[in-house]
Image (cartoon, rainbow, N blue to C red):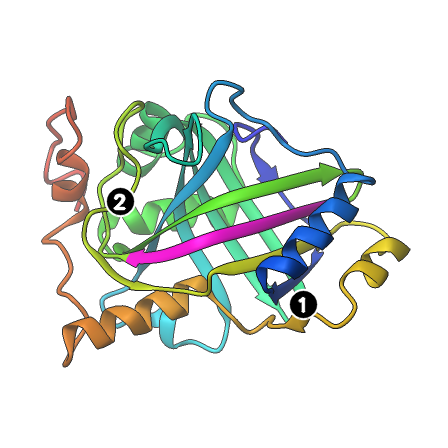
Amino acid sequence: MNQRRDVDLRHPELEERYLVAPGEARVFLARAADHVPADFFDPARPIAFVRTTYFDTDDLELFRSQRRRRIRLREYAGAPGRDGIPTLTGVCAFEIKESTGSERRKARFAGDRGDLQRLLRRGPHRPIDPDLARAAADVRSGRLRPRLTTFFQRRSYTGDGIRITLDEQLIFARPVRLGRAGEPAEPADVIGRGPHLVLEIKLAGPRPRWVDEAARGFLLMNRFSKFKGGMLALSRADAVALAPPRASMVSWLHELPGAHQLDSGRDR
């Protein structure tokens, strides 16, 4: 899968999420490797990581809503080995994900840091999904602000109509700024940890028989959410209330090295 590819899912995919033990994960991935090739995004840094910053309103509309809608900024990272330091690759994506039961729809705008800065400060420079464009406009106006960052190691396998991911060592942290390529990826202000292993199976076509056989007996946890789990961890860490938001999205974006000065009236 090309991390730089924009996505616009007009038709829903089926997504299943399982909490698995190390032995279950090992056996399942060995079976998956017989049917679906592994993704390797950077041969020099084959251990892949994902850093995700989630957005919400001041009254936490997305967190409190029964509608499972996520607006997030993803940054991809890699390490040369399991003991290496994960560093950002510079590939990023702004996404909307909406789930109903086990179905999901997703739209994303992918690019490098400059592309994402431009989207969130000035608007899209190429056609994108209308809902995604509205979400970016809400970030520019300050209606949506960064609330939470998650970080985890990811192994993934992608084939025709199927994608499998195994997320390991999930951590929750206070939101971090959009990074630049080569910077350490792991957030510093960690406030909690999630399940050790989360297995996800995304299907855009018929469910392969081998998936049924390999996942038999796994604990299905489709209601588990990294966003909600992290927001609850933030609430516990702050004891009384969630951490106050930054003064504005403009100030958050201005923390980027080399960020251009903006016309403050234009971005309010």
- Measuring from the top left, give residue 89's x and y in whole percent: 39, 26
Q: Position of residue 200 (x, y in %)?
A: 63, 56
Task: Find numbered disc 1 in the image and state the secondary structure of the residue it sits on.
Answer: loop
Q: Residue at x 46, y 65 (%)?
A: 195
Would you say 235 lies left or right of 5 here?
left
Whether the magenta-drawn stretch holds residue 2 is answered as: no
Q: Which residue is rendered at x = 80% and y = 59% of the image?
A: 214
Q: Residues within 10 Å of mark 1 (few under 14, many from 20)?
A: some
Q: Main secondary structure of the magenta part?
A: strand
Give the magenta-colored segment's residue range: 162-172
Say what secondary structure mark 2 lies in.
Answer: helix
Q: What amino acid type is highlighted by mark number 1? A: Ser
Q: Is residue 100 above or below residue 209?
A: below
Front position in the image: 140 or 199: 199
The residue mark sitting in front, 2 or 1, is 1
One can see residue 219 in this view: yes
Residue at the disc numbered 2:
140
Distance between the Cα atoms at labels 2 and 1? 31 Å
Seen at 40% across and 64% down, the residue is: 194
Q: Residue furthest right?
A: 209
User: Residue 253 falls in which quadrant of the image?
Assistant: top left
Q: Is residue 178 left or right of residue 119?
A: left
Q: Residue furthest bottom?
A: 240
Which is more N-terminal, label 1 or label 2?
1
Is the residue 256 above or below the residue 132 in the image? above
191 w.r.t. 35: above or below: below
Q: Residue at x 57, y 42 (%)?
A: 155
Residue 102 is tagged as 1
Left or right: where 46 falls relative to 219: left
User: Which quadrant of the structure image shows residue 252?
Assistant: top left
**Nearest the eye: 170 or 241:** 170
Residue 60 visible in image: no
